[in-house]
Image (tube, rainbow, N blue to C red):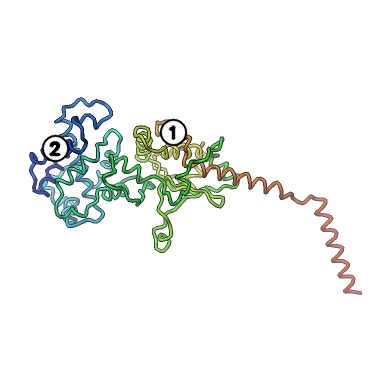
Amino acid sequence: MEQHKHWCVNRLLERSNHSLEPLVQAFLLRLSKTIKTKSFQQLYAKPVDMTEEGIGMMLLFDGCFILHFLLRHDPNKGAEHEYWTKLDAGLLDHEYETLQWERPWEWSLVAIDMLLLENQIPFVAVRILFDILKTEHDKAVDLTACARNMFNKYLPAGMCTSTRPIRCQDVRCLLQLLYRSLLPNPKLHSDLMKTPPKPPRTGIDPAKKLDTDGVRITRRQQWYWWPLSHFQEPFTFLDIVFSHGKVRIPQLEVSDASIQLLQNLIAFEKCYQGTTSHVANYAAFMDALNSDHHDTELLRKRSIFDVQFTPAQPELSLRRRCKQDVDPSSENYLSRMMVDVVLYKEARASRKKTQTPISDTAFFAVLAVTAYVLLAFCWYIVS
């Protein structure tokens, strides 16, 4: 991988007609001014056993590796589309000595690896490198749009990001950008900005019990065809809603990659101040809904779980697989939905009690009166 990082640095230098030494000097100087500290050590929560120059060079090579990968996934393609296409097809292997990590079938592994919590670097380093190395073709490039395009292309099914604008200056690291892109859509949850109600003491019932009690569990689908897509707000896998007796849940691919991502997102929520606990609350909710193999089978039949494990597991516990404490927090964004489910069940049970079935005696009495009236009517016609 270190060899590949050097390869990326050389490619970026060639396309921008820069040389390495001026790049190193300009990068370290601008990084020092941007972070406004005397030590690069302060970029990390724990002491790093490296010299200042070593940290700076590590950020340069890691940043160039990330920048090269993001530029490849520019959604607008740009003037260099032909170059990237030839590189992908292997037509430039001899000229550029292409390495294994530049192969398209490796990119999903690279994307997942870049999002591990321990592999995060300050995104400001990537921004500075892009500002130094950009060409005239890069004027319209938006790094956040490149990252989102990369997320949607390689992340597990169901983890598509939202289209809400996020400024490049507000991004701390790639994992934070992914996290912000997956947050629930405020337009779909008008109560997200309000203090959530206290969750029901019992939480959410298992899927099988909800189905028995008249609350149907269905898959929430994204429409891609016009005009249906025009009238639908985009949503992420966290956007679970309840309406008209149905809990609608977006599909989630359950695989090693998705579990690893959930694990990193939950860890990110714990490590970074100012973040919510939406992913942890989601995992706790899905675990409560999926309490045993009967619930798992129901969720699979309803296409809510797309299980990719081989062989398929009879029971799927996100709590156990994420290896994280995923107990719901007091400010649970799903609290309002769970309260609405409880109120719906109570109202439905109350209606059943008031609808007293007709007794056998009353039924036969009505039947006898009806028969007597019919006989009397027939006698009247005959006579």
The residue depicted at 17 percent of the width and 57 percent of the height is 79
For marks 1 and 2 on the same chain, the one whose residue lies earlier in the sequence: 2
Residue at disc 2, secondary structure: helix
Q: Residue 4 appears at what percent x and percent y? A: 17, 39
**Disc 1 and disc 2: Cα gap in Å?**
42 Å
Position of 310 compared to 96: left or right? Answer: right
Image quadrant holding the N terminus, namely top left
Residue at disc 1, secondary structure: loop
The residue depicted at 17 percent of the width and 35 percent of the height is 32
> Please, is residue 316 above or below residue 301 in the view?
above
**Residue beneath disc 2:** 29
**Residue beneath disc 1:** 326
* Amino acid at dot 1: Val
Instruction: Please say if the residues under marks 1 and 2 sit with CB atoms less than 8 Å apart.
Output: no
> Please, is residue 308 above or below residue 53 in the view?
below
* Amino acid at dot 2: Leu
Image quadrant holding the C terminus, namely bottom right
Position of 187 compared to 143: left or right? Answer: right
Q: Residue 93 appears at what percent x and percent y? A: 13, 48
